[in-house]
Image (cartoon, grey):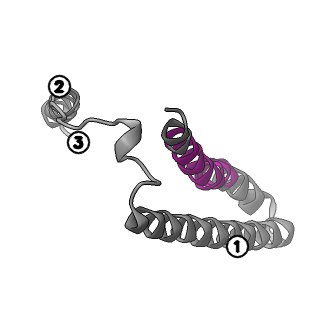
Amino acid sequence: MNKKIQKLAYILVIAVAIVSIATNVFAEITPGNLVGKDPDSTQIVDVGQNIIGILRTVGVVLSVIVLIILGIKYMMGSAEEKSEYKKTFIPYIVGAALIFAASVFAEAIYGFFNGMNGAK
C-alpha cells in the first residue's frame, strides 16, 4: 500500500475517533426511568437476557468445535503444519476470550443499571 494512502487512512481513523468522542448525548439516566417501573420494560429485559444466553451458548459451542478441529489438525499435521496451527491458536484464544468477555460485560452493565434502579 502506498505510504500516502496509509497516512491518509490513519488520519481519517483518528478524525472519526475524535468526532465520535466529541458528540453530545442528550439522555438522562435516573433511577426512575430504568427497568422496573413499566411492565413492558421487564419484557425487554427478558428478551435481552434470552439473546445474551443464546449468543453465549452458540459462542461456547462454536469455540469448542473450532478447538477440536484445530487440535485434530495439529495432531495429524507435519512439523510445518504444526507451526502454522500454533500461529492460528493465538487469534483463536483472543476470539474465544472476547466471546466469553462480551457476555460477562453485558451482564455486568445490566447489573449495574439494575442496581441503580433499586437505590432510591
Type of the residue with mark 3: Met
The image shows residue 59 at horizontal and vertical percentages of 62, 67
Residue 39 placement (x, y as % from top left): 42, 66
Secondary structure at numbered mark 2: loop
Rendered image: mark on residue 61: 1
Image: magenta residue range: 89-113
Label 1 to label 2, Cα distance in Å? Answer: 39 Å
Return the mark for residue 15: none
Q: Quadrant of the N terminus?
A: top left
Residue at 53% in and 48% down: 110
Residue at point 44% right, 52% down? Answer: 35
Residue type at numbered disc 2 = Ala
* Residue for point 72% across, 62% down: 81
Image position of 18 (left or right of 73): left
Q: Mark 2 points at which residue?
A: 22
Q: 10 Å neighbourhood of mark 1: few (<14), some, or many (≥20)?
A: few
Circle 2/circle 3 CB separation < 8 Å: no
Taking 71 as reference, is 23 above or below it? above
Q: Distance between the residues labelled 2 and 3?
A: 31 Å
Identify the element where label 3 is drawn. Answer: loop
Disc 3/disc 1 C-alpha distance (Å):
38 Å
Taking depth in this image into account, of 71 and 4 the one nearest to the observer is 71
Q: Magenta region's main secondary structure?
A: helix
Towards the viewer: 72 or 52: 52
Q: Which residue is denoted by mark 3 in the rendering?
A: 1
Q: Does the magenta stretch include residue 24?
A: no
Q: First in sequence: mark 2 or mark 3?
A: 3
